[in-house]
Image (spheres, rainbow, N blue to C red):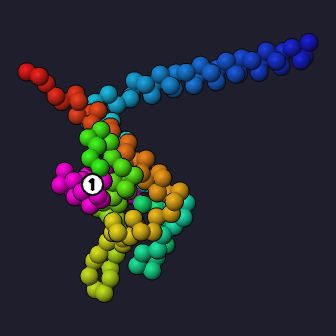
Amino acid sequence: MEKDKLEKQADALLDEEKKGAEAEEEQKEKEAITDPAEQLRELCKGTLKLLNPIRAHSQDVKEIKYDFCDLTGMEMMDALDSVPTINNMFGISNKQAMALFSATAEKCAPMVEDGGKLTRLYDAKDVKARLGAADSVKAMQLAKLFYNASSQAGNNNISKK
C-alpha cells in the first residue's frame, strides 16, 4: 500500500512538472518574435566560442563576437567580392561565407592599445588565416544562415504594385 501511495505522489509530481513545462513553452511562444527583420537581427548576432583559440596581438582570442546586421551593404559586398567565385544569385560559396563572417568579426573586434594608438585586436585577415577547421565550419554556417535569412526577410518587403 505504501508503495502505491508513493507511486501516485511521484506521478502527480511528474504531471505537475509537465504542466509547468507546457505553460512555460506557451509563454515562450507568445513572446516569440514575429517581425522578420527583428528575427534576423536576433538570429545573426552573438559570440562564437572558439574550440581552438587564435593568437592576435600576443593574446589568446577564445571567442569572436559577430553581428551581421551591423555590416553596411558596401561592407558586405566588399567581403563577398573579395573572393573570386562563380556567380550564384541564390547562395554564397564557403569562401564567401568565411569572408563575410571575417568582415563582421573584424567590425565587432575589441579595441586594444598598440604602440600608443588604439587598434582592433584582430582583423578580417587574422580571422580568415587563423580560424581552425571546426570553428570555420560554424562561422560559414552562420554567414550562410544570415545570407539566406536576409533574402527571406526581404521577400516580405517586395510588392508588385
Residue 99 falls within the magenta-colored stretch: no
Q: Pick out the residue farthest to the bottom.
A: 115
- Res 113 → quadrant: bottom left
In this view of the protein, which residue sits in the foreground, 94 or 25? 94
Q: Nearer the viewer, residue 30 or 139?
A: 139
The range drawn in magenta is 65-85
Amino acid of disc 1: Leu
Which residue is found at the position 77% from the left and 21% from the top? Answer: 10
Q: Secondary structure at mark 1?
A: helix
**Vertical placement of 38 versus 130: above or below?**
above
Could you tell me if residue 144 is visible in this image?
yes
Q: Would residue 67 be seen by someone viewing this image from the given angle?
A: no
Farthest-out residue, right: 1
Residue nearer the viewer, 92 or 54 = 92
Task: Return the x and y of residue 75 as percentages of the image width and height.
Answer: 21, 57
Q: How many marks?
A: 1
Which residue is at 26% across, 41% downward? 89
Give the farthest residue toward the left: 161
Q: Residue at x 33, y 65 (%)?
A: 124
Where residue 43 sits in the image (x, y, percent)? Answer: 37, 41
Question: With respect to residue 57, does 66 lie above or below?
Answer: above
Check residue 71 for magenta coloring.
yes
Dot 1 alpha-carbon crowd within 10 angstroms: few under 14, some 14 to 19, many 20 or more: many
Location of mark 1 (residue): 80
- Quarter the C terminus occupies: top left
x, y (%) of residue 143? Answer: 36, 49
> What residue is at 11 percent from the left and 22 percent from the top?
160
x and y percent of residue 24 in the render?
51, 26
Quarter the N terminus occupies: top right
